Amino acid sequence: MADRSFLDWPFFEPRHKAFAEAFDGWCEVEIAPLEAAGEPEADEALDATCREIVRRLARGGWLNAAVPTGRDGKLDVRTLCLTRETLARHSGLADFCFAMQGLGPGPISLFGSEAQRAAYLPAVARGDKIAAFALSEPEAGSDAAALAMTAMRDGDGWILNGAKTWISNGGVADFYVVFARTGGAPGAKGLSAFIVDADTPGLSVAERIPLIAPHPLATLEFKNCRIPASALISGEGEGFRIAMGTLDVFRSTVGAAALGMARRAFDLSMQRAQGRELFGAPMFDLQMTQAALADMALTIDASALLIYRAAWTKDSGAARVTREAAMAKLHATDGAQQVIDAAVQLHGGLGVRAGHPVERLYREVRALRIYEGASEVQKIVIARQAAQLMGR
Ligand code: COS
């Protein structure tokens, strides 16, 4: 049974605790059996599993947390984080499916017009539309402002040309939020964000990319892909601000997913330490085991504090949480990698047996230190923010 004491921290309101408990119970019934069935390997099986997960999440009403469909029109970042933490504790793939229903339409949720929100967000919440976020390119990953894809004005619309890669839900999504260069302004200043439906002529999946822990991922090609003027999110030249503003909100949720995986690894390690005899006594009695468990518990709590600080700060009305979100993602993802590595070690041979839960976690957690801004990017962001805070 995972530690729930953190739900009594002052970052949360009673509704968060009730939500986390109800959602965990639902995951036991609806998600755990899918996870226990093993990892889908072929693309078709993987896509079908993802669609099934989205359907289940929608049926349970849980996708309402991914997009602001409520009356106040706002995302509750603490609920987003609690959802990802809980899902990731049960299934990395289910967490991925939920996360993309948040990040994919994130620019619409945060910066879209009323018409764009009405056209996409309720359909995302119902699971009728699967979403994706298309920023990275073959030559522009960490340096997002270097992206080369173009959007040229054409009458009352735009023509997109270029490629996007490492796109989560590529090939599965019903629509993509795509960042492209408009006009001649250099770097970050010349970018704009567009909504592109997956069936738009000229958009194709060039390659599906297999991963160490299977998730749908693809390279997309845009060849003279025509989209209407209404596809532009906010204004021309606003793309970089939109991308960064969206990542600011969703980066702490990546930390939350890592935290959920770390908690699962910790629970499994505690069970093993208490259940296995070693040198004539429970393995837990060895001080080396206690030291490993103590390091894990400390990393988990420190990550949780940073994540829910970032989420609470955003929910409390902060205009930007760039620094808080970067710290949360960096610490929680790097920390989860260490916690899971320690769990593998405590499990001995079982820890590297294909399909064992800690072996799956070991593969599953690795991408989190890379996507939505690698650990090194978070360090750049944190250092710049610290300099700014000190007036330099
Ligand atoms: N919110 C709002 N505006 C922001 C912002 C944020 N979080 N971060 C930067 N900006 C603004 C800056 O204020 C600046 O505006 P002005 O020119 O008006 O001053 C502009 O955007 C450019 O900012 P900056 O100079 O910091 O841009 P860089 O190109 O140096 O950005 C990093 C560098 C590394 C921070 C950025 O490229 C980044 O986050 N990269 C990782 C991308 C990523 O996460 N990719 C994964 C995609 S999803 S899997």
Image (spheres, grey):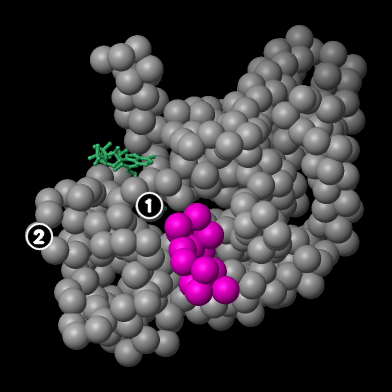
Magenta region includes residue 29: no
Q: Is residue 271 left or right of residue 202?
A: right
The residue at 24%/78% (across/down) is 158
Mark 1 sits on what residue?
243
Which comes before the other along the chain, label 1 or label 2? 2
Kindly tell me whether residue 183 is visible in this rendering: yes
Given residues 171 and 20, the one toward you in this image is 20
Q: Residue furthest bottom?
A: 201
Q: Which residue is mark 2?
A: 184
SS category of the residue bearing label 2: loop
Instruction: For ligand 1, tell me if the residue under mark 1 lies within 8 Å.
Output: yes
Q: Position of residue 194 (x, y in %)?
A: 35, 69
Asked whether residue 261 appears in the rendered view, the answer is no
Give the amino acid at mark 2.
Gly
- Confirm whether the magenta stretch covers residue 114: yes
Q: Residue at image x 65%, y 25%?
A: 305
